[in-house]
Amino acid sequence: MKIQKRIYYFTIISLSILIVTLIWPLIRLPVNENEIIGQYSQNKYNSLNDIIRYLLFILIPIFSHCLYKSYYEKNFLKKLLFNLKTGNKKYFFEKKLLYIFVVVFFLLILEFFSNPLSIEKVDLFHAGQKLSSAFKSSIDNSLWSGSYVTVGIIYETLGSKFIWNFFNQKTIGGMLFLDSIYLFITKVLLLSLVLISTTSLNLNTNLKIFFFIISSLMLLYVNDYSPSSSNLISFRDGPIILSLILFLKGTNSKNNIYFFIIGFLSLFIFLWSVDRAIVFFCFLLLIIFYLILNKKLKNLSVLLFSILFFWFVFIIFFNNEFYFFLENTFDVIKHHSYINGIIHPLPFSSENNSSRATKTLILIIISLIISINLFLEKNDKYSKSFKICLFSLSILSFLSYLYALGRSDGPHIKQSFLFPYIFFSFYFIFNFIFYVSKIKIDLVRKNLNVFFIYSFCLLFVPVLNLSYLNILSFNQRLQKFISLDDNNFISKNDKKFIELVSEYTISEKCIELFTNDAIFLYLLKKPNCSKFYFVYSIGTINNQKKKIKDLNNAKFIISNGKTDNWSIPISKKYTLISEFIDENYLVLVEFDGRKLKVKKN
């Protein structure tokens, strides 16, 4: 009978996935008349198509799973809610585990100081996003009022500005070193998440240490400090990871500080990254539901008070910038997918990035099914705290695929794989250790401590790329790296073009860009005349008109950059601006395809 049930189950789930795959291309919402020229508009494509397709692809198999369970399991929903309501296991940090955590944390510090601080040519597009806005803010202290922010004010403006003030030098090296700091903090957060998860396991101390070591290795080895590396884990996910840690810790503590900090994150994450903020607020709704379900009214009150308090402080202290923040943020949320959107590939097809997307989608479904089933199991193999941890990771896996829906290229789909990767790492490592713990091997049992020590030493050191010489010389190398001339990070042709343009613009208060090479404002040490310094994300006709109005203050414009044809050429994306420039500006200097244009008398 069990075999027959399993056949039924796999047939139902497989059929549901087959059905949603077949109906995927059939979902075509009516096209909204949209003034933004992008891949969506060129293909007469509604941006909601991908969202609805994704929701159906995930939720129909999950709904089928729940129907199956409700048929064979009495009181399926009641059991699920009851297990969510029951109290969790108190976290207890064993001394051995804490010792290992401290050692690994120390190794992470050594790895940070081993950072080779490589000198590589920067991406004129993305590096410019973190340099030019920060440079303008360093002159006039403007935030959203001075620059149209696409990602987040900390990412684009305040981060680089802070590191420049700290070292008292405005350099590309400073910005790159800040990225290393972000990555280090993210690694520490991942290590802390592993620690919190480890303490919730129904295992003895030595086996917990084994889980901690292997899980840490799985999460830490995928990122390094090389600027050119394509890391699996983006430091932009740091606040999401922190919110998960605080939630897991807060549910098992009488101290309300954890929920107070989550309230602060509700503000911070909007300043950090708008797309991560959307995921955070969806996860926040889950936290609120959990607190209501468990009648943790004190925790809920602290959380809601903290949210209101920090947003009130933000409104009061940022004054007029708050209104620019609201306008900017709503504009990005409303139009970003039409500006930068790439149509999501059909699962199980030969389209670009379909294989990577399909893998992630299937793993999200499996993670949700596993986490739901865990709450229906009667045995004590999984502690309730660990179930909550895995369930939260599966929900974040589901939510974080938002990054791939807005722009379905390889790097963004890869970034959405973070939480499924963490979920399955935890799940399979735990089950492997649990299985091994049931095998009576005297040699292992008698020498378990020695085994852990050797595995720890043999596995961690090579993974973290430690360098004794780099550690000793870190301070001298850092000072040299921070002080490096910016020309070290750009090509010879870029340098030559900057020198040519500088001769004509040296007395100008500001210049303007009509190129995606956003770094030129910073390299010329000139603020943008218009807040739309990042031309790639201007978007709407209204924003084009605003930029044209600001061009009255711009004598010089740089155009025809190297990154202008990464997607649709900007002359086609922004026809109003292009026509205005053609009518009112003349080419003054041309080098390596780039042009400096001057306003007609």
Image (cartoon, rainbow, N blue to C red):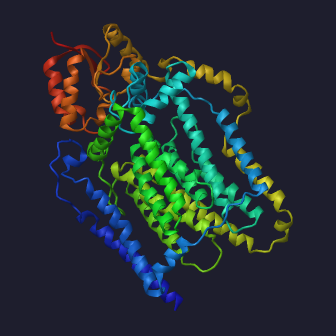
Residue 99 vs residue 23, the one in the foreground: 99
Please provide percent x and percent y for residue 333.
31, 46
Q: Quadrant of residue 339?
A: top left
Taking the image as shown, residue 169 lies to the left or right of residue 38, namely right
Q: Name the residue at the left extreme.
A: 583
Q: Is residue 226 visible?
A: no
The residue shown at (76%, 54%) is: 455
The residue shown at (39%, 20%) is: 140
Taking the image as shown, residue 167 lies to the left or right of residue 161, namely right
Q: Is residue 355 above or below residue 102?
A: below
Q: Is residue 362 visible?
A: yes
Please provide percent x and percent y for residue 32.
17, 52
The residue shown at (33%, 7%) is: 507
Q: Is residue 218 above or below residue 444?
A: above
The quadrant of the image that shows the C terminus is top left
Please provide percent x and percent y for residue 92.
71, 60
Please provide percent x and percent y for residue 483.
56, 18
The residue shown at (48%, 85%) is: 73
Q: Quadrant of residue 423?
A: bottom right
Taking the image as shown, residue 291 lies to the left or right of residue 562, namely right
Count of numbered circles on the image: 0
Q: Is residue 453 above or below residue 119?
A: below
Q: Name the residue at the right extreme.
A: 446
Residue 123 vs residue 491, the one in the foreground: 123
Q: Is residue 565 above or below residue 211?
A: above
